[in-house]
Amino acid sequence: MKRYLIIITFIIIVICSTQTALTKPKVAVTIFPLYDIVKNIAGESVDVKLIVPPLASPHTFEFTPHEIAELQGTKAIFCIGHNLDNWVLKVRYAYREKIPIITVDKDIKTIKNNGVENPHYWLSPLNAIKMADYINLSLAKLFPNRKGNFKRNTSNYKGILLSLNERTLKLLKPLRGKMLLTYHRAYDYFAQAYSLRILGSFQPPGGKSPTPYYLKKLTEKIKEYHVNAFFVEPQIPIERVKSFISDLALQIYYLDPLGGVKGRESYAALIRFNRNSILKAFK
C-alpha cells in the first residue's frame, strides 16, 4: 500500500511539474498593430492578449469589468502612450500585484500638430523596427529564460520590416510631394517616411470636433491644391463626413491605422493596404 502511495505521489508531482512548464506567461497589448509586433517577437514563448478589438477605436475605448478581470495574471501591458491609450493606467492597480506598463516609444522622435503630440508613430515601418528592438529588450527582462528566442525572432522580424520599407519606398517614390487629405492626423509618420505631405484632416489635431471656421480654411486649401481624394477610416462611420464629401465632390479611399481584419491581419499587411490605397488614389 505504501508503495502505491509513493507511486501515485510521484505521478502527481510529475503532472503538476509538466503543467507548470507548459503554462506560458501572459502579456497584454492595447492595439492590434502593436499586438502583432509583440507577437512576432514573443513567438510561442508568451501568450499575447489584444485589449482593443479590431474596428474599435483606442481613442474612445473603455474597459468593462469583464475585460479587466481577463487581465489577471498579466505580467506586463505594452502600450503606445502619448494620450492614445492612457486608459490602460486604470488597470495598473486593479490587482494586488501592480502590472508594469511598457510604452514602446524608445528612441522615436514624435511629431507635433499645432502643439498636439501625434501618437501614431507605429505607422512608419522604420519606427516599428525601433519598437521591435525595445519590445525584445523588455520581454528579455520579463522572461530572461526565453531571451534567446526573443532575440532570434527579433532578427527575423526586422528583416521583414526592412523589406517592407524598401518595397514601399520604391513604389511610392513617384508620388513624392503628393498631398493627402485624411479624416484625422494619423498618417504624419507614414507621410514623413515616404516623402508625402499632409494637406489637412477633417478632424482637428487632438480629436476635437471641427468648427465652421476650421472647415472653411480646410476647404480653401483643398480647392487651392486641387485635391480630390479623401482618405477615411474603417473605424469611423462614413455618415459623419457625407456632406463634406458631397459638397467638395471628393473621391473616397480608405486608410486604416489599426488593422486586425481580413486583408490586414498583420502589421505588414496593414502597411501594404495603406500603401496600395494611396497608389490607387494617385494612379
Image: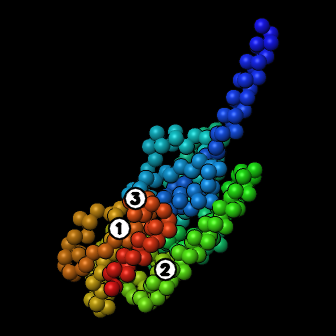
Instruction: Give the Cα separation between the discs numbered 2 and 3.
Output: 21 Å
Q: Position of residue 233 (x, y in %)?
A: 35, 67
Disc 1 residue type? Glu
Which residue is identified by label 1?
A: 233
Comes first in the chain, label 2 or label 1: 2
Quadrant of res 205: bottom left
User: Which residue is painted at 68% across and 58% down in the image?
Assistant: 150
Q: Going 37% across and 81% down the picture, which residue do you hit?
A: 279
Structural distance between the alpha carbons of marks 2 and 1: 20 Å
Residue 89 image point, x, y percent: 56, 52
Q: Mark 3 Cα within 10 Å, few/some/many (few <14, many 20+)?
A: few
Q: Hey, what amino acid is under mark 2?
A: Thr
- Find disc 2 in the rendering and name its residue: 168
Residue 96, by quadrant, is top right
Q: Secondary structure at mark 3?
A: loop
Observer able to see residue 111: no
Q: Nearer the viewer, residue 128 or 168?
A: 168
Q: List the residue tagged with mark 3.
A: 261
Residue neighbourhood size for the residue with mark 1, other residues' Cα within 10 Å, grouped as few (<14), some (14–19), many (≥20): some
For disc 2, the neighbor class at 10 Å (few under 14, some 14 to 19, many from 20) is some
Q: Earlier in the sequence, mark 2 or mark 3?
A: 2
